Image: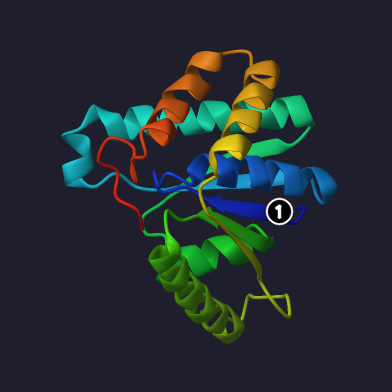
Amino acid sequence: MEAGIALLLTGACADLPAVVHAIDLAKRTTGIVHAVFRTERKADRKSKAFGETRGDLISLATGLGSQEGVSIHTHILERMSGEPLVRFLCVHRIFCLVLGVGDQQAFERKTAWIDLLRKQLVASDHWYLPVLWSVIITPWDDPALERIITRCKQTVSSSSVVETLIDGLRKGRDTFDGIETA
């Protein structure tokens, strides 16, 4: 099994930039991205938005990945922390973690969380790397967003997927239709 990049998707406004960044990084390395979602909670099941957003992100990732020659594997974990995540990272030989955050405070929380995750990995008998690389993506500013919108429309056959996600970003929402960030 080849090593890959884990793309943790939470429904945050920075998931779109994280998808693009993970695919660009995979293009330069192993060509494999593991898109990871958490399982639906009871509250999520009441809202169709969770499943729709998950589907939109998967469509976007697979469309861009296909265009760029990157394999996209999707996974659902019961939790994106602790033992389920550590086991996933070991089994799939993940060398880099990519995730998006909405603001500076979330960036600081995720940085601390990744430090804890690294300690858990080192303690695992199945971890094989000296270090887990990580990239925390923040939302794009307006010029970068418009550039990426143009790129996505040119490379993805179904631009409605991109438009749905972009509309949320343009409106300045921190989540897509009630999906909690991790």
Residue drawn at point x = 60 percent, y = 54 percent: 6
Task: Check the image and report above or below for 21 versus 131.
Answer: above
Residue drawn at point x = 49 percent, y = 15 percent: 160
> Residue placed farthest to the right in the image?
28
Which quadrant is the C terminus positioned in? bottom left
Residue drawn at point x = 35 percent, y = 27 percent: 52
In which quarter of the view is residue 151 placed? top right
Q: Looking at the picture, how far across and down is residue 158, in whole percent?
A: 56, 13
Classify 10 Å Cα crowding around label 1: few (below 14), some (14-19), many (20 and above).
Answer: many
Q: Looking at the picture, how far across and down is residue 21, in whole percent?
A: 66, 46
Residue type of the residue flagged with mark 1? Gly
Task: Check the image and report above or below for 139 versus 155.
Answer: below
Q: Nearer the viewer, residue 1 or 118?
A: 118
Q: Is residue 60 left or right of residue 27?
A: left
Q: Looking at the picture, how far across and down is residue 8, in whole percent?
A: 51, 52
Residue drawn at point x = 64 percent, y = 57 percent: 92
Q: Is residue 30 left or right of residue 164?
A: right
Q: Looking at the picture, how far across and down is residue 7, in whole percent?
A: 57, 50
Check disc 1 and report its element: helix, strand or loop: strand
- The residue tagged 1 is 4
Q: Is residue 31 left or right of residue 154?
A: right
Number of dots carrying numbers: 1
Q: Nearer the viewer, residue 167 or 155?
A: 167
> Residue placed farthest to the front in the image?
143
